[in-house]
Amino acid sequence: MKREEPVITRNEEDYLKTMLNMILSGENVATNSLASRLNVAPPSVTSMVKKLMGKGLITYQKYGAIYFTASGEKVAISLTRRHRLWEVFLSQTLNFSWDEVHEVAEELEHVKSEKLMSRLDKFLGFPKFDPHGDRIPSVDLVFSPVKEAALIDISLGQSCQFSAVRDDSSKFLRDLNKIGLKLGMELKILSNGTHTINLKCSNSLEIKIPIDWAKKIYVTKI
């Protein structure tokens, strides 16, 4: 007899997607770190963890790390794939700016029609990256490998290309817009300070950015 798939609520999906984003960013997933990322109280996370365990989506031992089961990882990657494909659609087809697409895609990602997503993927030309430079999982739910590093880790004088951001909040993206930083730009580290980094951009613009920004901006070396 075929085992029935558990019914997963939207809130539960949001937890799973957040866990995946943390893992992709190299963070350890635990109740406190998850609570901080979601801006909720730790007891709320503990309660949700129990629900997700009961549905066979995660494993967890008290005071330990939280891990996906194969089923939970599949749900999280599928949700992320839908979210990022919708962001591409909103950006390329409806001319939403990169600081507008995230919130709208948060609503659309919960539509689970595989037929719709397959046709959307084909319509968009099978994109590999979303408007923020994040990888879009394949139809087989596999992330293609990519060699990126945080700008904070790039050596003085090294040239690189702005390839992704690890903060898709509207405020951060609008801040990047204000200083003219865009994906695809060639960047060169001119100097490192205690609080800021001096950059030269491919359009000959020289700018200073806070150290905290350099932790969220990802680049590929040239």
Image: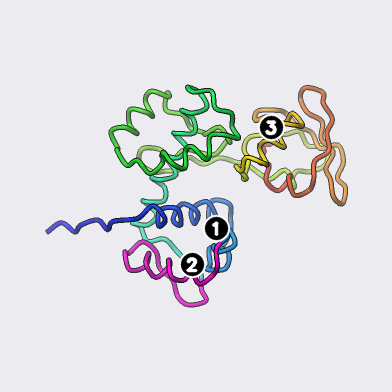
> Residue 67, image x and y in percent?
45, 64
- Give the class, few, some or many, for how many residues have Cα within 10 Å of label 2's Cα (few <14, many ≥20): many
Where residue 119 appears, as percent x and y from the top left, is 33, 27
Numbered label attached to residue 161: 3
Which stretch appears magenta? 40-64
Lower sequence index among marks 3 and 1: 1
Q: Residues within 10 Å of mark 1 (few under 14, many from 20)?
A: some
Q: Are marks 2 and 1 in contact (CB under 8 Å)?
A: yes
**Type of the residue with mark 1:** Leu
**In the picture, residue 9 is in which quadrant?**
bottom left
**Crowdedness near tag 3: few (<14), some (14–19) or many (≥20) residues, C-alpha within 10 Å:** many
- The amino acid beneath tag 3 is Gln
Question: Where does label 2 land, which residue?
Answer: 45
Position of residue 30 relative to residue 120, above or below, is below
Which SS class for mark 1?
A: helix
Q: Residue at x 71, y 48 (%)?
A: 215
Instruction: Please give the residue where the numbered disc 1 appears in the rendered image.
Output: 38
Disc 2 residue type (three-letter): Val
**Is residue 44 within the magenta segment?**
yes
20 or 158: nearer the viewer: 20
* Residue 186 in the image, given as x and y percentages of width and height: 72, 28
Residue 105 belongs to the span the image colors magenta: no
Report the Cα–Cα distance between label 2 and label 1: 9 Å
Drawn side of residue 151 relative to residue 92, left or right: right
- The quadrant holding residue 189 is top right
The mark tally for this picture is 3
Residue at the spot x=69%, y=32% of the render?
A: 161
Distance, label 2 to label 3, CA atoms, is: 38 Å
Helix, strand or loop at mark 2: helix
